[in-house]
Image (tube, rainbow, N blue to C red):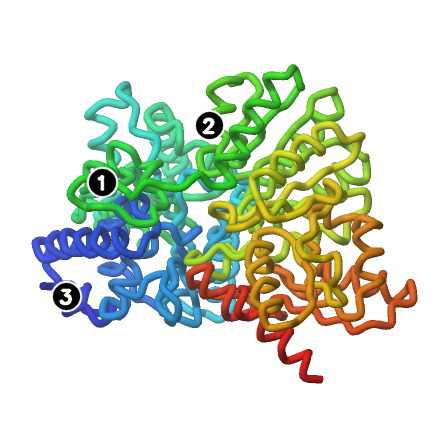
């Protein structure tokens, strides 16, 4: 097996073309085996195998720096950079990350988990190399989906005039070369993407320039003629070359020899280059080729059939159903997503109300201000977004929504721990930064019943932004035992309790278990489960004020948390009891299962009991 012999990218450089093709086949087999067992991003990685192999055959990582956008396509890169032996640990606790992670390997140049960052990062890296007289290259590998985000264009606008050795590879896995381009244009694309083309071009230009008086004019005429012909054949090239990039392609991203020639040609250009590569998501695995969306991110499947175990109904699916039902009642709801319609559960709404469903692409900032515009003119926009991607929208939340007191509902998915996706995707910060924004109301349901009530409350509420945040996965156990004193909060075994365990969201089910365990041990403790977490409901604050001991547990960052806000409010009102706050410390949380993450930070039932028992000893 060739793949087993690859200890570094240097080993890829020595391989012949037949060996490279064998290596690609072995990489695909390894990807399928590992992702089918561990879960992860499959279709995008299968589509980038030949491209990544060619990159490491032509360039010299890490001296030449390869920056992968998002990292959905970096698995082959990991296999070729000395991590084959560890690859079975992918996305497991203590194992390899599912994204690029600099503290994992010197070949991982930049953290990658959010889209659209690679061109900016690559421009900064290549500019630094230029300042340092470093002759090596920087290569940014970016998918066509990322070109729906504005940050890419900000970087392109600056990069075209940089004159640095920055090669941008547009990994185009959705658009195909249209039929009217024809065989001649495809042939020219290959010719233009060979090292010999650029060597001949440079030699011709030097010869023409030596002709007295007319040499420079001939070069310009030749360039204008070439550009005119090319622009008629390649509509894509005009935009990039107007910005200052040498456009190359489009080329077949699954032909190793063509890719190698094109990358060598890109190295021969003295300045920024954009190489347009056409790939197929899921390439080499028919089930993923036929349905790339289903195999974008998977939790495990049978390779022989492509089938995954049946999934339980989760918060995302329930939210999508509830939103569609709300629209049936004549509510002028509009659903907005940033290229995450399927994963946020909006497909039923999209099917039923296509005119009011808006996928704006990977452009979260635009999505928020777009929603604000809808709200200003009488519609009720609901923006469904992962917690980790809401981080990008802080200014728009403040300036375009809250300041103008516009009614926009934010359905914040994947709030809390997300498990195996790791540091870049944890939903642990939204409460902390949303807590700083005036006028905003935040709900964090612990179960489907509370989710339905919160969405109804948000729809019926008077103006201003409303957030309903919920976790990845399904509802916890035993939440039916809660007694709902008020839509804003619920209790369990709190009537006679001198001690109060306070929490909200998913870990309410763990808190119920903890109360049951501790009561059997003779500890008179009750549970207060908050549903509305900003502003804190006054009756819930009154309950806390009268408890002798308060134990607050929070699945989020401690800094800026609900617990901190509650402690300050109680202190300002003369609280003199004991207060304990257990939350995630000032850190980024690596991949593990959600259960392992809850256990590590003492947010499961056992951890809660341990914290409370220790306090009882004092």
Residue 395 can be seen in this image: no
Question: On residue 306, which mark appears?
Answer: 1
Task: Judge depth for marks 1 and 3 and give the one in front.
Answer: 1
Q: What separation in Å lies between label 1 and label 3 (alpha carbons)?
A: 35 Å
Q: Which one is nearer the viewer's eye here, 456 or 478?
A: 478
Q: Which type of secondary structure does the marked residue at label 2 adopt? A: helix
- Report the residue marked by disc 3: 14
Viewer-nearest residue: 182 or 70: 70
Which of pointers 1 and 3 lies earlier in the amino acid sequence?
3
Q: Is residue 429 above or below residue 161?
A: below
Task: Measuring from the top left, give residue 413's x and y in whole percent.
Answer: 55, 44
Q: Quadrant of residue 134?
A: bottom left
- Dot 2 or dot 1: first in sequence order is 1
Q: Please give the label number shown on residue 347.
A: 2
Give me the residue at 30% from left, 62% from top: 78
Q: Residue at x 80, y 31 (%)?
A: 463
Q: CA distance from mark 2 to mark 3?
A: 48 Å
Q: Position of residue 349 (x, y in %)?
A: 51, 24
Question: Residue 572: x and y, percent?
Answer: 90, 64
């Amino acid at each position: 097996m060739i793949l087993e012999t690859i200890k570094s990218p240097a080993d890829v450089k020595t391989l012949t073309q037949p060996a490279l093709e064998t290596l690609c086949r072995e990489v695909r087999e390894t990807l399928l085996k590992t992702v089918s067992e561990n879960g992860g991003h499959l279709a995008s990685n299968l589509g980038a195998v030949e491209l990544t192999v060619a990159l490491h055959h032509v360039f010299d990582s890490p001296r030449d720096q390869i920056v992968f956008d998002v990292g959905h396509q970096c698995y082959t890169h990991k296999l070729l950079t000395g991590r084959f032996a560890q690859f079975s640990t992918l996305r497991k606790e203590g194992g390899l990350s599912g994204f690029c992670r600099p503290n994992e390997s010197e070949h991982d140049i930049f953290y990658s988990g959010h889209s659209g960052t690679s061109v900016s990062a690559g421009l900064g890296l290549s500019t630094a190399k230029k300042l340092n007289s470093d002759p090596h290259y920087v290569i940014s590998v970016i998918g066509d989906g990322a070109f729906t985000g504005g940050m890419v264009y900000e970087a392109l606008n600056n990069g075209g005039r940089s004159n640095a050795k920055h090669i941008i590879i547009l990994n185009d896995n959705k658009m195909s070369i249209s039929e009217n381009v024809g065989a001649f244009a495809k042939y020219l694309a290959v010719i233009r993407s060979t090292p010999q083309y650029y060597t001949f071009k440079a030699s011709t230009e030097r010869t023409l320039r030596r002709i007295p008086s007319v040499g420079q004019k001939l070069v310009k005429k030749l360039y204008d003629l070439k550009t005119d012909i090319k622009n008629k054949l390649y509509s894509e090239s005009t935009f990039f070359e107007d910005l200052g990039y040498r456009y190359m392609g489009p080329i077949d991203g699954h032909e190793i020899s063509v890719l190698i020639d094109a990358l060598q040609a890109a190295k021969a250009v003295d300045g920024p280059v954009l190489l347009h590569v056409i790939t197929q998501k899921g390439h080499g695995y028919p089930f993923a080729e036929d349905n790339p969306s289903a195999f974008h991110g998977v939790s495990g499947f049978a390779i022989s059939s492509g089938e995954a175990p049946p999934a339980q109904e989760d918060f995302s699916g329930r939210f999508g159903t509830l939103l569609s039902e709300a629209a049936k009642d004549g509510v002028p709801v509009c659903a907005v997503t940033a290229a995450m319609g399927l994963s946020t559960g909006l497909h039923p709404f999209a099917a039923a109300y296509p005119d009011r469903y808006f996928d704006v692409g990977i452009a979260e900032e635009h999505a928020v201000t777009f929603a604000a515009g809808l709200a200003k003119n009488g519609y009720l926009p609901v923006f469904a977004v992962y917690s980790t991607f809401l981080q990008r929208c802080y200014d728009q939340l403040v300036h375009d929504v809250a300041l103008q007191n516009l009614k926009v509902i934010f359905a914040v998915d994947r709030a809390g721990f997300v498990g195996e996706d790791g540091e870049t995707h944890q939903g642990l910060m939204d409460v902390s930064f949303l807590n700083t924004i005036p006028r905003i109301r935040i709900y964090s349901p612990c179960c489907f019943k509370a989710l339905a009530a919160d969405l109804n409350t948000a729809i019926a509420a008077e103006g201003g932004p409303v957030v309903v945040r919920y976790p990845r996965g399904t509802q916890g156990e035993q939440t039916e035992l809660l007694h709902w004193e008020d839509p804003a909060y619920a209790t369990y075994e709190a009537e006679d309790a001198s001690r109060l365990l306070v929490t909200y969201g998913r870990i309410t089910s763990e808190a119920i278990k903890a109360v049951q365990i501790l009561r059997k041990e003779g500890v008179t403790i009750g549970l207060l489960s908050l549903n509305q977490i900003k502003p804190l409901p006054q009756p819930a604050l009154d309950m806390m004020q009268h408890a002798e001991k308060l134990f607050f547990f929070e699945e989020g960052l401690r800094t800026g948390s609900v617990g901190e806000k509650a402690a300050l409010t109680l202190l300002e009102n003369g609280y003199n009891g004991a207060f304990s706050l257990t939350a995630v410390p000032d850190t980024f949380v690596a991949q593990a299962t959600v259960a392992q993450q809850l256990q590590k930070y003492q947010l499961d039932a056992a951890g809660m009991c341990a914290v409370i028992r220790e306090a009882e000893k004092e």
